[in-house]
Image (cartoon, rainbow, N blue to C red):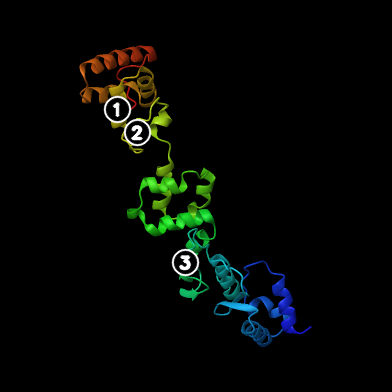
Amino acid sequence: MDTSQTIRQAIAGMPQGAVFSSVNFLSMGTRAAVDQALYRMMRSGVLARVARGLYAAAGQSVQAQTVATAVAHKTGERVGLVPSDGLRDVIMVPTSGLSRAVKTLGHTVQFRHMSQRKVQLAASLKGRVLLELWTRGMKNLTTIEIKYATGDWLVRDIDSYAAMIPAWLRTAIRQANAPKKSVKIGLSGAYDWSNPHIKDDVLIGKVLEKHKFEDVVRLCFYYGVPKVKRVFKQREFESITNASVTRMLTNISKGLRLPQRHSYA
């Protein structure tokens, strides 16, 4: 069996949409023989030229990720995953090799040279999400966007990428996914629903304004009675609220039997 027939059989056994180059068939003949066989198969309509040096069986749909993987196999470079919205005309793929554009059937794959960390990130779906956040930059991201992108991840998922992303992004993800103070304290309502980074004094003031006894008790356990009293004295409340909170704090202090001079602030 000659080189051409051997290559035809190998191609017939490949999955639908496979992309390949002469590198895939060097065990079946010399480089010149393999190149000549692929060229003749393309001229006869058996193969379609996907990009320079890359081919696929004629009439088959080819995915951008398959092209990127084939390029990596051909050149030996490392490449990342194609973004999830890979139907755009120009698709950016991180690479450890040279930056260049590869025109393929239906779109252009823009290989962009990046650091080893970024290429490593782009090799997985979650890593690709982190790379996109990193690329946008600290000034262009909001807490809501970060939480939307990573909010359903497990802690171990985030930790597994910690060494690959910059410190500012690690901090931003940790802050965006940190439980709200109202949850940590065990309050009955989301007093901080509009501001997950609410200051302690502001949160205490909001709880005292509502003056629900069980929430005031939880404040006192979490922050200490002296700190809650200090915030209470610094703020102005309606007379009914003022009288109710005064009574609550007096009873809580007695119940906890805490020295009034002791501070948890």
What mark, if any, has residue 206 been given in the picture? 1
The residue at the point 32 percent across, 54 percent down is 139
Q: Circles 2 and 1: CB distance less than 8 Å?
A: yes
Q: Amino acid at mark 3?
A: Ile
Q: Does residue 114 appear anywhere in the picture? A: no
Q: Circles 2 and 3: CB distance less than 8 Å?
A: no
Query: Which residue does the numbered mark 3 point to in the structure image?
Result: 91
Q: Amino acid at mark 2?
A: Asp
- Between the residue at mark 1 and the residue at mark 3, the CA separation in whole angstroms equals 49 Å
Query: Is residue 86 positioned above or below 20 on the image?
Result: above
Does label 2 or label 1 sit earlier along the sequence?
2
- Residue 190 horizontal/vertical position (percent): 37, 30
Helix or strand or loop: what does disc 1 sit on? helix
Query: Which residue does the numbered mark 2 point to in the structure image?
Result: 192
Indicate which label's residue lies in the foreground, 1 or 3. 3
- Residue 72 horizontal/vertical position (percent): 57, 71
Q: Amino acid at mark 1?
A: Lys
